[in-house]
Image: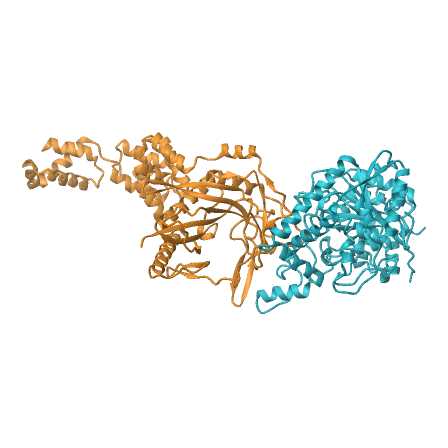
Chain colours: A orange, B cyan
């Protein structure tokens, strides 16, 4: 039987506000345990929460970028459970009236657009962290109270590739908005998935399995691939999927395994937090934020195609991160040949960025230096081959292209007299090849060009060498 | 007349005229405490050294000709659910018996800034859950008028301390009547301000949507004096209102001419005859002074009581979830964290608190939420509507504060329903967030009877003015319990 895969994602995003969601403690990552804490986020008696407006602003930005409807007012509610990382015994979250609902996000699978629905975007506070040391468990409350957005997709995702594309797109949007670091390895972007299989064409929904602990795009995709196959195998031999099971992904063994679940399903006893009045969102504020939204990846991709005449593929790659798109536009403004710039960035520049594990804005090759390099190439001061060496040097040393070319003596030889002499020498040294060429063997010319280049350590102007050789022959 | 018998504003005048020093005042009250505290048991913690030091500083400031603040040198004592930095704050519970908060309630820091001298922390029902001060984990407080009777609760310590002359002023907290009911039982004035008038920062929460800090004092002027210091917006409490306090105490004039007072029929009918009679007398006096009293119906009295207990228990079950033995307070260890939770809460909390937490958890649980919590919230809306309708015709409402006078002590673990009912008249304004005040207005069985005045939101000035006018006319002011001095 053919099965349809139904996936929904629940993404938690740590917002990079300066202070926590309901107190003024800093949100800095990696501080000494329990240093970014106050009576409020430690849940001491007598303390009260005060809403961080920046959290709401970032929430609104994200919700608008995801095409959501903003609720005119929303509620903060308390979600209760006892756990050592939860100082108040409840988490301030949103349940009945979240910040925003009914949005979507577009992903492109093999060039085709697919809209994936966003069910809701809500604000909540993060819990602390537990550190297990020997027989003890230590509590670090630095993270307790850090603002989170929970973004819940509709179950519109039908494959592991789509899930990954959704996650990558979401991350790109969040980075464009500047509302989060989105560092999966530090936990500032976390993702849980719900997955079920059902016979193709069936309307009934299959039994859902939740998978947690997905800390990278790769584990997201791998875990889904594994889980889809696991469930398919069970269904095919007529078995039943576990009810309400929660699985975890084992990164090492690349398998999902059932997590230890509480005996009874928890009753969170949500109710409106009486310490926080309903949050009324001023429509004017929404308008203001809308006006100030940066150009988002899809719009920028479209513009790159229209304004620079780039093919969709190039535009897609270049706008996949805000920094890369900014970099591209920086270079193009100094060297207005969009496709050439695109080629150089997509090949050499990205290759070297990866090799050095850098973000575009961290590259030692500034847009100015990149443009300088392309100018050298255009003026035929260096050849393409040399240019590739120069950019390597630029990454390695941080120097400008002119300095490198001068220091290394890589200036292209375009002096006709100097080259003529070398051409003569090469022709004299290879009479056999010359003869082959004259007999009509075109390939022989390439060999001769190569010999001239070799004699000049690659510095000869290849066009000029071609012309001279043809003349002499 | 002895210093301990004076009101705060009388002491203030004496000190400002230089007739008595703050140190003498504070010493006089500690002497009184020494004499009667064994009988009354109003305090949990006394801070004589710090108090005297504060008093000396006030005297010094005054000697230097600088302004020591509008409550300079005036003693005040605090209900022990108000956080005092570095000073044990127990909430009357074993679970916090040794807890020294790193924070201070905004109301308390405003009092300190105004120069008030803190004498100590006062007894209460555990976590303010009760109407008798018997649920305190330490000891019950006794009513100074009759030591065999309860002082009311949960601010029983504050009410008894003021009545016994152990302090001229006290700060309490009022959720369903915890300031007004003990004020009525102890024959003093107690004010519950409009919800949001006084910051709740530093008040250990019982039911956040109703908790308000309020003063208890011997007369209306003193209540006004405290209110003008503690009121006003506080960024630390998002539910505090952005309204500046006024000099309420200076605006008190004996004038009630033409003021329309509504008398809710259902309330008066429910009071015992002696209380009914006392209140009727006071209302008659009010009419003679020029007010226009008229009956009105506020029908949702019984449902209000039920709704209150559901909402209060639900919010309390949530607010008290933080008492888990981890970050502060008592920890009783166990084999694992679950057992530690159970041991800590099992041994740290008393039976009344446990009962309410279990009920509150039940009211919020799946399948019960709609039937209990949501229904209670709807009843709350009905009560708001009742009051809104009343405000179309009246400037304020007058009721007995309690259906009975102070009740005798009972020994049962779980008090009879009668005890829960002693908040029945104070609960509706609590649910509606209205300001309300209890004024001693007469006697029944030799015990004080309280008159409750309920105002429109933020109408404390009118409330205080009417109470002040009546107070001047009914000669209760100078009545003091006779406590044999040991
Ligand atoms: Zn904090």
Residue drawn at x 44%, y 49% is A9
In the image, taking residue A387 as reference, residue A222 lies left or right, namely: right
Residue A38, can we see it? Answer: no
In the image, taking residue A20 as reference, residue B260 lies left or right, namely: right
Between residues A370 and B37, which one lies in front from this camera angle? B37
Quadrant hosting residue B166: bottom right
Mark count: 0
Identify the image quadrant of the C terminus of chain B: bottom right
Residue drawn at x 66%, y 52% is B315
Give percent across and percent down for residue B430: 73, 47
| A361 over B50 or under it: above or below | above
| A307 over B265 or under it: above or below | above
Give percent across and percent down for residue A370: 34, 37
Between residues A462 and A243, which one lies in front from this camera angle? A243
Between residues B73 and B233, which one lies in front from this camera angle? B233
Give the residue at the far bottom of this rendering: B335
Give percent across and percent down for residue B230: 76, 44
Residue B270, can we see it? Answer: yes
| A63 over B365 or under it: above or below | above
Give percent across and percent down for residue A385: 25, 40
Between residues A94 and B4, which one lies in front from this camera angle? A94
């Amino acid at each position: 039987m053919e099965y349809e895969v139904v996936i929904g994602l629940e993404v938690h995003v740590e917002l990079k506000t300066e202070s926590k969601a309901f107190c003024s403690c800093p949100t800095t990552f990696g501080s000494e345990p329990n240093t970014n804490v106050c009576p409020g986020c430690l849940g001491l008696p007598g303390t009260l929460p005060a809403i961080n407006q920046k959290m709401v602003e970032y929430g609104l930005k994200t919700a608008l970028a995801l095409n959501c409807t903003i609720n005119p007012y929303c509620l903060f509610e308390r979600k209760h459970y006892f756990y050592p990382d939860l100082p108040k015994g409840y988490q301030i979250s949103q349940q009945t009236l979240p910040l925003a609902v009914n949005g979507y996000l577009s992903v492109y699978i093999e060039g085709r657009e697919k809209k994936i629905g966003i069910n809701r975007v809500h604000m909540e506070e993060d819990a602390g962290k537990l550190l297990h040391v020997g027989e003890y468990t230590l509590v670090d409350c630095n993270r307790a109270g850090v603002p989170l957005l929970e973004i819940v997709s509709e179950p519109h995702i039908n494959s592991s590739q789509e899930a990954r594309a959704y996650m990558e797109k979401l991350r790109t949007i969040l980075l464009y908005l500047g509302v989060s670091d989105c560092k999966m390895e530090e936990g500032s972007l976390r993702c849980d998935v719900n997955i079920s299989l059902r016979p193709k064409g069936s309307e009934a929904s299959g039994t859902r399995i939740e998978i947690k602990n997905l800390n990278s795009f790769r584990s997201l995709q791998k875990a889904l691939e594994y889980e889809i196959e696991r469930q398919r195998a069970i269904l095919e031999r007529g078995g039943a999927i576990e009810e309400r099971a929660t699985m975890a992904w084992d990164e090492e063994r690349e398998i999902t395994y059932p997590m230890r679940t509480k005996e009874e399903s928890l009753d969170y006893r949500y109710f409106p937090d009486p310490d926080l009045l309903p949050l009324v969102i001023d429509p004017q504020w929404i308008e203001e934020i809308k006006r100030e939204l940066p150009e988002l990846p899809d719009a920028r991709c479209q513009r790159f195609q229209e304004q620079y005449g780039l093919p969709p593929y190039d535009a897609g790659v270049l706008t996949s991160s805000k920094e890369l798109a900014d970099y591209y536009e920086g270079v193009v403004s100094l060297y207005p040949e969009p496709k050439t710039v695109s080629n150089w960035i997509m090949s050499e520049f990205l290759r070297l960025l990866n090799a050095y594990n850098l973000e575009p804005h961290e590259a030692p090759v500034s847009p100015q230096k990149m443009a300088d390099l392309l100018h050298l190439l255009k003026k035929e001061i260096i050849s393409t081959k040399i240019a590739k060496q120069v950019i390597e040097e630029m990454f390695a040393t941080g120097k400008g292209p002119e300095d490198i070319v001068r220091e290394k003596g890589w200036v292209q030889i375009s002096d006709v007299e100097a080259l003529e002499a070398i051409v003569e020498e090469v022709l004299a040294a290879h009479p056999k090849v010359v003869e082959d060429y004259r007999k009509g063997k075109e390939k022989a010319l390439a060999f001769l060009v190569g010999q001239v280049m070799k004699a000049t350590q690659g510095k000869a102007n290849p066009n000029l060498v071609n012309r001279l050789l043809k003349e002499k022959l | 007349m002895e210093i301990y018998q004076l009101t705060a504003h009388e002491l203030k005048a004496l000190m400002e005229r230089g007739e008595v020093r703050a140190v003498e005042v504070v010493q006089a009250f500690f002497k009184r405490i020494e004499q009667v505290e064994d009988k009354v048991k109003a305090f949990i913690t006394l801070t004589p050294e710090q108090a005297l030091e504060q008093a000396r500083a006030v005297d010094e400031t005054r000697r230097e000709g600088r302004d020591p603040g509008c409550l300079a040198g005036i003693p005040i004592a605090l209900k022990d659910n108000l956080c005092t930095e570095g000073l044990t704050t127990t909430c009357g519970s074993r679970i916090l018996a040794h807890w020294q908060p790193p924070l201070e309630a905004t109301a308390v820091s405003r009092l300190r800034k105004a120069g008030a001298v803190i004498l100590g922390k006062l007894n209460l029902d555990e976590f303010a859950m009760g109407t008798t001060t018997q649920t305190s984990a330490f000891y019950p407080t006794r009513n100074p008028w009759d030591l065999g009777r309860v002082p009311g609760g949960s601010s029983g310590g504050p009410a008894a301390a003021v009545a016994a002359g152990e302090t001229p002023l006290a700060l309490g907290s009022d959720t369903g009547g915890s300031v007004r009911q003990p004020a009525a039982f102890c024959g003093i004035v107690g004010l519950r301000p409009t919800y949001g008038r006084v910051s709740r920062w530093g008040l250990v929460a019982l039911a956040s949507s109703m908790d308000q800090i309020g003063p208890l004092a011997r007369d209306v002027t003193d209540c006004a004096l405290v209110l003008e210091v503690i009121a006003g917006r506080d960024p630390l409490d998002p539910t505090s209102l952005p309204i500046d306090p006024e000099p309420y105490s200076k605006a008190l004039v004996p004038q009630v001419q033409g003021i329309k007072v509504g008398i809710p029929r259902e309330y008066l009918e429910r009071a015992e005859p002696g209380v009914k009679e006392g209140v009727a007398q006071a209302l008659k006096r009010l009419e003679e002074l020029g007010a226009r009293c008229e009956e009105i119906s506020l029908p949702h009295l019984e449902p209000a009581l039920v709704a209150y207990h559901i909402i209060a228990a639900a919010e309390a079950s949530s607010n008290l979830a933080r008492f888990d033995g981890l970050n502060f307070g008592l920890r009783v260890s166990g084999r694992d964290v679950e057992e530690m939770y159970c041991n800590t809460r099992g041994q740290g909390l008393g039976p009344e608190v446990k009962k309410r937490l279990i009920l509150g958890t039940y009211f919020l649980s799946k399948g019960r939420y709609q039937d209990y919590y949501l229904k209670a919230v709807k009843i709350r809306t009905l009560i708001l509507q009742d009051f809104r309708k009343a405000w179309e015709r009246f400037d304020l409402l007058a009721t007995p504060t309690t259906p009975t006078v102070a009740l005798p002590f009972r020994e049962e673990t779980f008090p009879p329903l009668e005890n829960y009912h002693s908040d029945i008249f104070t609960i509706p304004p609590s649910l509606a967030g209205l300001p309300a005040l209890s004024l001693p207005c007469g006697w029944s069985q030799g015990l004080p009877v309280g008159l409750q005045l309920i105002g429109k939101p933020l109408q404390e000035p009118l409330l205080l003015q009417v109470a002040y006018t009546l107070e001047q006319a009914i000669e209760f002011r100078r009545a003091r319990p006779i406590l044999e001095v040991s």
